[in-house]
Amino acid sequence: MKTNATPIYNQSHNTTGCCPKFNPKGWDNQELHFKDKKFLRAVTKSAMHVPLNMGSVFGRVAEHMEDSAAMTTEDTFILSRDTSPWEAEHLFAVRKDVEGEEMVTLSGDFITRVFEGPYRKAKGWDAEMRVAAKAQGKEDTEVYFMYTTCPRCSKAYGENYMVGVARI
């Protein structure tokens, strides 16, 4: 895949008015190559890995990105990871800086895997991503997840896809 590119996230099938239905085609077993790829970084609070303020934080971020014209539907790519049982980090891919938000860049090579099932399986999927990264020579790695739909939409669609992304 080209540097700083991600697979296409087709957003045309949206019957909920919220999250589009995720099509996993093209997302599984991919290699992503980032060089100073720009992201907006946001942090949410959790209680034992259960998000507490995700809606308000994501709402604020979405408003700021829209006001800045920093993201298009083709750019939709949000990486999330728990940094502790009490906090999670979220990286929103953007085309340019967003005023009032923390900006970061990512560089490196990453692999992807698509998983489907309830969120409670995420711990096992994290372990699978670490094994896959280790098989490619990366002993200790960063693992992120792209949540493709909110809980309400995953219930409506009858599927809960998540994309694991691990640095190799």
Image (tube, rainbow, N blue to C red):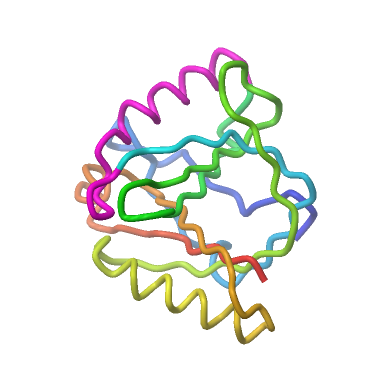
Q: Which secondary structure is most common in the magenta stretch? A: helix
Q: Which residue is located at x 33 percent, y 66 percent?
A: 122
Q: Position of residue 118 (x, y in %)?
A: 24, 63
| Magenta run includes residue 67 | yes
Q: Which residue is located at x 40 percent, y 30 percent?
A: 58
Left or right, residue 1 beside residue 58: right
Q: Which residues are magenta?
A: 46-69
Q: Write down the quadrant of residue 101 in the picture.
A: top right
Left or right, residue 104 beside residue 121: right
| Magenta run includes residue 86 | no
Q: Write down the quadrant of residue 53 in the picture.
A: top left
Left or right, residue 11 beside residue 166: left
Quarter that holds the C terminus: bottom right
Q: Relative to 82, does residue 26 appear above or below in the rendering?
A: below
Q: Position of residue 138 (x, y in %)?
A: 66, 78
56 and 25: which one is in front?
56
Q: Relative to 136, does residue 4 appear above or below in the rendering?
A: above
141 and 4: which one is in front?
141
Q: Which residue is located at x 49 percent, y 64 percent?
A: 164
68 and 56: which one is in front?
56
